[in-house]
Image (cartoon, rainbow, N blue to C red):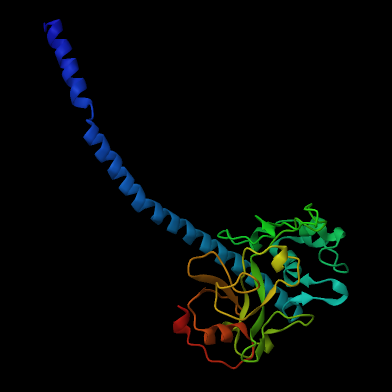
């Protein structure tokens, strides 16, 4: 039978062997820090890749709704229905095709988009209309809602309308060159696929234009949610192709295809894909 002293010595020695020295502890902390430093960027990249895919899926749903609308009426929705100050957006017309019939039935087409009677509908968030990567909001927006204030700082009557991160393609303009070419979403006139003489696969229908609030017409009911591209991608948040995806934006073409458009695209290509009948030839290898 071992003595009590030997047993106590073994316990002390075992405890001593299990303990970390300060140097060992610091080494472990340093290694863990390095591993975290290597892992976090990869995790963030994976999360953004997932958000970008979800954004592209949103556009595919919008594309299917637009194709269904065209099949039913022989044309795409009017970009902005302007008469009598209604200013109603193309995106209102798509609601029944995006499983939002209840919201659509609350909307009165005979009244302006921001009339008090339309606010119960227009304050409804439509998840398909929001890019999950959006984080750079303008001063007229808080999260998925507009933030419109009176001169006294109180919320305006039509504040709190739900936003959209996608805009209809009105066309392309370069005033210095005197160029103004039409796209697929214009004022008070419906456009059909037949009018996209450049080809459905080479003509943008809708593209990302994220983060805008009431200042930049970023509500899904607002008919001025159509934009006239005039410069490179990701340069201007006010009615231009813009997103928080690193390197570019997602775009929906008239044939239903969704492509990622890099912000480094040559302006000749940007001009070509934003217009419906410019008779340009696109080098698709430059879009990859």
Percent of width and height locating residue 51:
52, 60
Q: Is residue 211 left or right of residue 267?
A: right
For the image, the number of numbered tags is: 0
Residues 107 and 20: in front is 20
State the residue at coordinates (80%, 58%): 158
- Quadrant assignment, res 105: bottom right
- Looking at the image, residue 248 sits to the left or right of residue 124; the answer is left
Q: Residue furthest front?
A: 152
Nearer to me, 187 or 257: 187
| Res 140 visible | yes
Quadrant for the C terminus in the image: bottom left
Q: Nearer the viewer, residue 53 or 249?
A: 249
Residue 246 horizontal/vertical position (percent) = 48, 66
Residue 212 is situated, as x and y percent measured from the top left of the image, at: 66, 64
Residue 29 appears left or right of 262: left
Q: Residue at the spot x=79%, y=80% of the render?
A: 188
Position of the N terminus by quadrant: top left
Give the quadrant of residue 30: top left
Residue 64 appears in view: no
Residue in the foreground of this view, choosing between 217 and 51: 217
């Amino acid at each position: 039978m071992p003595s009590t002293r030997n047993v106590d010595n073994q316990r002390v020695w075992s405890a001593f062997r299990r303990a970390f020295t300060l140097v060992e502890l610091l080494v472990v902390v340093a290694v863990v820090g390095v591993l975290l430093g290597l892992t976090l960027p990869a995790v963030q990249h994976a999360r953004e890749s997932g958000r970008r895919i979800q954004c592209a899926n949103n556009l595919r749903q919008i594309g299917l709704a637009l194709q269904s609308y065209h099949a039913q009426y022989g044309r795409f929705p009017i970009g902005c229905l302007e008469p009598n100050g209604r200013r109603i957006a193309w995106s209102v017309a798509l609601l029944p095709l995006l499983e939002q019939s209840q919201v659509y039935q609350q909307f009165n087409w005979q009244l302006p988009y921001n009339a008090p009677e339309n606010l119960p509908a227009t304050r409804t968030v439509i998840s398909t209309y929001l890019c999950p990567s959006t984080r750079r909001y303008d001063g007229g927006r808080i999260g998925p809602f507009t933030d419109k204030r009176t001169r006294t700082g109180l919320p305006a009557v039509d504040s709190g309308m739900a936003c959209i991160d996608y805009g209809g393609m009105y066309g392309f303009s370069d005033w210095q060159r005197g160029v103004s070419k039409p796209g697929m979403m214009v004022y008070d006139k419906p456009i059909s696929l037949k009018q996209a003489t450049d080809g459905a696969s080479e003509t943008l229908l809708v593209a990302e234009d994220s983060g805008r609030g009431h200042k930049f017409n970023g509500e899904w009911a607002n008919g001025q949610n159509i934009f006239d591209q005039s410069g490179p991608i990701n340069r201007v948040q006010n009615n231009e192709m813009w997103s928080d995806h690193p390197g570019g934006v997602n775009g929906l073409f008239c044939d239903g295809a969704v492509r990622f458009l890099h912000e480094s695209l040559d302006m000749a290509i940007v001009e070509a894909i934003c217009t419906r009948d410019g008779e340009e030839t696109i080098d698709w290898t430059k879009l990859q």
